[in-house]
Image: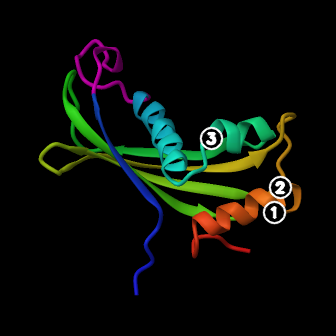
């Protein structure tokens, strides 16, 4: 049986400010969209980022990020962003992203991997430092965590 990972999909429109001088979406803008996708995924599953993580000094810093650009996106083009929680461990969290055109074809796909760090930038084990939060994440995302 295939594992179903937590997923969030939302519609958006490419803004003029997202594009470069050639009139197509600037490559680095996709990573801003990926950030929005993570925030929306947490919100959908009842873990609003600011109150659940940020205000408890649980910051998620990027360790790895990548994107494969398949089709150009233009200003005022409607697209949808799908964010999937891919990895959840006591020290890391990872996501996969797909941006779809209105015809359903993928325009881009990417990933990010993050470490939990405190306000000083020091990495930590979230289960040890925030056991209640770890328990809640396990309850919200059953079957995706590694103990």
Do callouts 3 and 2 mark residues in contact (Cβ within 8 Å)?
no
Earlier along the polypeptide chain: callout 3 or callout 1? 3
> Looking at the image, which residue is at 57% across and 76% down?
143
Report the magenta stretch's main SS: loop
> Looking at the image, which residue is at 45% across and 77% down?
3
- Using the rendered view, name the quadrant where residue 56 is placed: top right
Give the labeled residue for mark 1: 127
Q: Secondary structure at mark 1?
A: helix
Quadrant in which the N terminus is drawn = bottom left
> Looking at the image, which residue is at 75% across and 49% down?
116
Crowd band around label 2 with a 10 angstrom C-alpha radius: few (<14), some (14–19), many (20+): few
Crowd band around label 3 with a 10 angstrom C-alpha radius: few (<14), some (14–19), many (20+): some
Earlier along the polypeptide chain: callout 3 or callout 2? 3
Give the labeled residue for mark 3: 49
Mark 1–mark 2 Cα distance, whole angstroms, equals: 5 Å
Q: Nearer the viewer, residue 104 or 12?
A: 12
Q: Nearer the viewer, residue 46 or 146?
A: 46
> Looking at the image, which residue is at 71% across and 43% down?
53
Mark 3–mark 1 Cα distance, whole angstroms, equals: 17 Å
Residue 20 to residue 74: above or below:
above
| Left or right position of 118 against 145 | right
Which contiguous range is marked in magenta? 14-28
Tell which residue pokes out farthest to the bottom in this image: 1
Quadrant in which the C terminus is drawn = bottom right
Name the mark on residue 143. none
- Using the rendered view, name the quadrant where residue 30 is placed: top left
Give the labeled residue for mark 2: 130
């Amino acid at each position: 049986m295939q594992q179903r990972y937590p997923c969030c999909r939302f519609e958006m429109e490419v803004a003029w400010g997202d594009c470069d001088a050639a009139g197509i979406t600037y490559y680095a803008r996709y990573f801003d969209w990926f950030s929005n996708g993570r925030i929306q995924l947490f919100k959908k599953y009842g873990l609003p980022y600011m109150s659940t993580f940020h205000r408890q000094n649980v910051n998620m810093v990027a360790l790895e990020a990548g994107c494969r650009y398949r089709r150009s996106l233009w200003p005022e083009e409607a697209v949808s962003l799908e964010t999937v929680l891919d990895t959840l461990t006591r020290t890391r969290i990872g996501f996969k992203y797909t941006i779809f055109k209105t015809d359903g074809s993928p325009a881009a796909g990417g990933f990010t991997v993050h470490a939990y760090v405190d306000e000083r930038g020091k990495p930590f084990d979230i289960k040890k430092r925030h056991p209640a939060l770890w328990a809640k994440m396990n309850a919200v995302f059953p079957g995706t965590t590694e103990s």
